[in-house]
């Protein structure tokens, strides 16, 4: 039967139907029941498309109430996994009620579009059967009828239960370069398969599921480590993070620093680079690295040789650099001589940061910034106390409320991104992403210019963890709301098209999947680890920045349906189906959060790197020019950068009060940066 193509919003499965998930296959030990052998009401058996199993499929008549009823057998009463194999070659969702023995057990289950009528997908739901014969009916709930139905499969329920939280970790056998980490065992309904060990959100080791301790080696002497443990089972379910333990390795017995490096020389100066050479240092054991510094701020670490090309310098800017040597114990040599130079003139296209001024002080982890449509004030969130502020262009701030239900994670969770509805002047809607008791949420509130009210959850079911919660919100030129989500320290979720984690999501202002989304659900792109930067360029294209684990941070150009690789890829790789980033950085130089675009240049705020990166887009192409760094080490950890409406300016905020910065509450600032 020919289907009419009508674009509608897909029903939110995660909110409307408990325990229903999209699936790439059926549960184990499944028994198949062909639709063409079932009882059909207002439908026909057809064979005019390919890819079906059995002798045909059921083409539902386009009327509400059309149905297919199966008679199935169960050896014993209890739960079962019901999987329906279907095709939907239109852009129209075709929801159905699923009933067992005459009782609806899942209502209006979404059967979104597949690529075409020859492409089959699966939808699974948990049901409870009685011993012996059972009837299962799938009934269309709209005038569009149901999808083409190939078969149902019944199997044992899949494992969806996560392990319990590991017990309090502790450290023993602490040495110069290692320690033993121990923790209380987790439990799981099937069994714990492994424990993942994290240091400040980066996975550094793992242990077998039967273990409750792990020797960690290769650590730096006299260094604090902030450690947590996460349990996982064979199905990929992960526990909440364990409590934190802080352990410091012992000082090294080697107290002799290397000698000072030989004469530092400079050559090959360009607008953004310089070539450096120096004489080798010596050490009683071994020199392990050289640090190129401005004062005491490290611009680059060199682990091989006595020369380097220093990239990412600001154009037409003075620099004074020295080099020191380090050994494995962390002993640092006296500095070499200092060389001074000025980089070449700037290219005129795009402008560069020309001045910076303190706009507002007294902040504690300001996280999200979003301008009101009139461009006169912005809303700013504070992560750990859940406050929302109105800030004027001259930096005056007024608290307008707090976001209910927000909680912290003693890591990166809390009150995160904020966005203002493009139609705010008529509907007064503003949006927040925050961590809650059950996970991360996207919510809507009203804001009348003075105070917040009318809290409403639009989307929940986004898993949380201590780290990797994402959290940025932005409206696109299409009027839809985009949200970045982390993989909640469960990397496999990033590759699951039906998980809300490790994604860029795209939704309507009512919290429904936006029409035209590539997979018929909320997912716009996948394969992300912890994305926290979103910005649209002059052509309406979406750029995104995200944290790497231990190798490369990324700047990506986001396209609908594209897979950005995590955890298969970190940075560039040559894997079919994975999309490479447009630029990458060593994690020590970036750890990016917010991004903004001014005059076709991406500006990226960096936390661990403590610098503002400038990345020019090459015209209207999909490539970028050479990244250059500003304010290296000057202002500390930089979290959010936002374009000022109607001006070539940025607002740049710090989060030096977070766990990694350690500054006193109220120490964070917002700066105004002029671009000229």
Image (cartoon, rainbow, N blue to C red):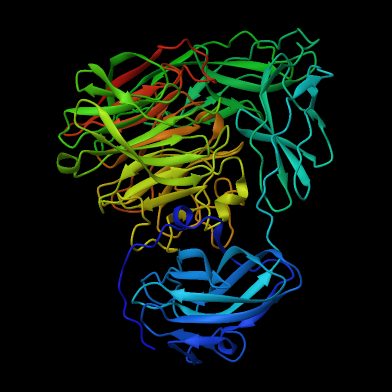
Measuring from the top left, give residue 287's x and y in whole percent: 72, 20
Viewer-nearest residue: 359 or 151:
151
Whether 126 is drawn above or below 199: the answer is: below
Who's the residue at 35% across and 22% down the image? 317
Whether 260 is drawn above or below 630: the answer is: above
Q: Quadrant of residue 418?
A: top left
Residue 616 in sight here: no
Q: In this view, does 427 lie to the left or right of 653?
A: left
Q: In this view, does 395 lie to the left or right of 466?
A: left
Residue 312 in sight here: yes
Who's the residue at 75% across and 44% down the image? 188
Quarter of the image that includes the N terminus: bottom left
Who's the residue at 35% across and 52% down the image? 507
Measuring from the top left, give residue 489's x and y in whole percent: 60, 40
Whether 31 is drawn above or below 514: the answer is: below
Quarter of the image that includes the C terminus: top left
Who's the residue at 60% across and 32% down the image? 201
Viewer-nearest residue: 508 or 201:
508
Q: Quadrant of residue 475?
A: top left
Measuring from the top left, give residue 114's x and y in whole percent: 46, 72
């Amino acid at each position: 039967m020919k289907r009419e193509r009508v674009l509608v919003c897909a029903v939110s499965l995660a909110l409307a139907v408990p325990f229903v998930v999209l699936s790439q296959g059926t549960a184990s030990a499944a028994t198949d029941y062909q639709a063409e052998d079932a009882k059909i009401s207002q439908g026909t058996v057809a064979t005019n498309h390919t890819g079906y199993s059995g002798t045909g499929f059921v083409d539902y008549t386009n009327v509400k109430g059309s149905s297919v009823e199966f008679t199935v057998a169960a050896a014993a009463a209890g739960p079962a996994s019901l999987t329906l194999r279907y095709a939907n070659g239109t852009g129209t969702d075709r929801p159905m009620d699923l009933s067992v023995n005459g009782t609806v057990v899942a209502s209006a289950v979404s059967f979104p579009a597949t690529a075409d009528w020859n492409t089959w997908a699966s939808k699974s739901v948990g049901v409870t059967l009685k011993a012996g014969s059972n009837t299962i009916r799938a009934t269309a709930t709209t005038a569009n009828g149901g999808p083409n139905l190939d078969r149902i499969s019944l199997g044992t329920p899949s494992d969806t239960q996560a392990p319990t939280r590991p017990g309090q970790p502790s450290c023993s056998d602490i040495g110069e370069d290692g320690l033993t980490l121990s923790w209380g065992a987790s439990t799981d309904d099937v069994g714990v398969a492994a424990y993942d060990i994290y240091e400040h959100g980066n996975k550094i080791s793992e242990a077998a599921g039967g273990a409750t301790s792990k020797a960690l080696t290769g650590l730096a002497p006299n260094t604090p480590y902030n450690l947590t443990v996460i349990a996982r089972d064979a199905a990929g379910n992960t526990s909440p993070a364990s409590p934190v333990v802080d352990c410091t390795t012992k000082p090294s017995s080697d107290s002799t620093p290397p000698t000072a490096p030989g004469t530092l020389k400079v050559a090959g100066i360009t607008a953004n680079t310089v070539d450096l050479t120096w004489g080798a240092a010596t050490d009683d054991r071994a020199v392990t690295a050289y640090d190129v510094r401005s004062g005491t701020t490290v611009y680059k670490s060199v682990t091989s040789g006595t020369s380097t090309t220093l990239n990412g310098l600001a154009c037409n800017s003075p620099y004074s650099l020295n080099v020191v040597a380090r050994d494995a114990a962390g002993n640092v040599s006296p500095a070499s001589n200092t060389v001074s130079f000025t980089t070449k003139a700037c290219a005129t296209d795009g402008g560069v940061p020309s001045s910076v001024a303190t706009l507002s002080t007294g902040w504690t982890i300001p996280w999200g910034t979003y301008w009101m449509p009139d461009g006169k004030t912005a809303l700013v969130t504070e992560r750990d106390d859940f406050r929302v502020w109105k800030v004027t262009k001259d930096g005056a701030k007024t608290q307008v409320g707090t976001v209910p239900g927000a909680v912290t994670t003693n890591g990166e969770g809390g009150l995160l991104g904020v966005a203002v509805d493009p139609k705010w002047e008529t509907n007064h809607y503003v949006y927040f992403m925050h961590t809650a008791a059950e996970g991360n949420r996207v919510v809507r509130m009203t804001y009348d210019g003075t105070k917040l009210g009318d809290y409403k959850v639009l989307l929940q079911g986004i898993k949380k963890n201590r780290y990797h919660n994402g959290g940025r919100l932005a409206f696109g030129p299409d009027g839809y709301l985009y949200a970045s989500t982390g993989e909640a320290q469960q990397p496999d979720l990033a590759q699951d098209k039906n998980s809300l984690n490790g994604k860029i999501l795209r939704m309507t202002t009512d919290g429904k999947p936006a029409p035209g989304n590539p997979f018929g659900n909320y997912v716009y792109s996948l394969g992300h680890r912890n994305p926290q930067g979103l910005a649209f360029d002059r052509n309406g294209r979406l750029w995104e920045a995200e944290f790497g684990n231990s190798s490369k941070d990324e700047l990506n150009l986001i396209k609908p349906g594209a897979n950005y690789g995590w955890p298969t890829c970190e940075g560039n790789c040559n894997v079919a189906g994975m999309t490479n980033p447009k630029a990458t950085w060593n994690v020590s130089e970036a750890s990016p959060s917010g991004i903004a675009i001014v005059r076709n240049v991406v500006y990226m705020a960096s936390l661990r790197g403590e610098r503002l990166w400038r990345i020019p887009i090459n015209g209207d192409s999909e490539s970028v020019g050479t990244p250059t760094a500003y304010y290296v080490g000057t202002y500390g950890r930089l979290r959010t950068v936002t374009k000022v409406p109607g001006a070539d300016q940025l607002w740049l905020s710090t989060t030096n009060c977070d766990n990694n910065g350690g500054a006193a509450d109220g120490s964070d600032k917002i700066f105004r940066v002029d671009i000229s």
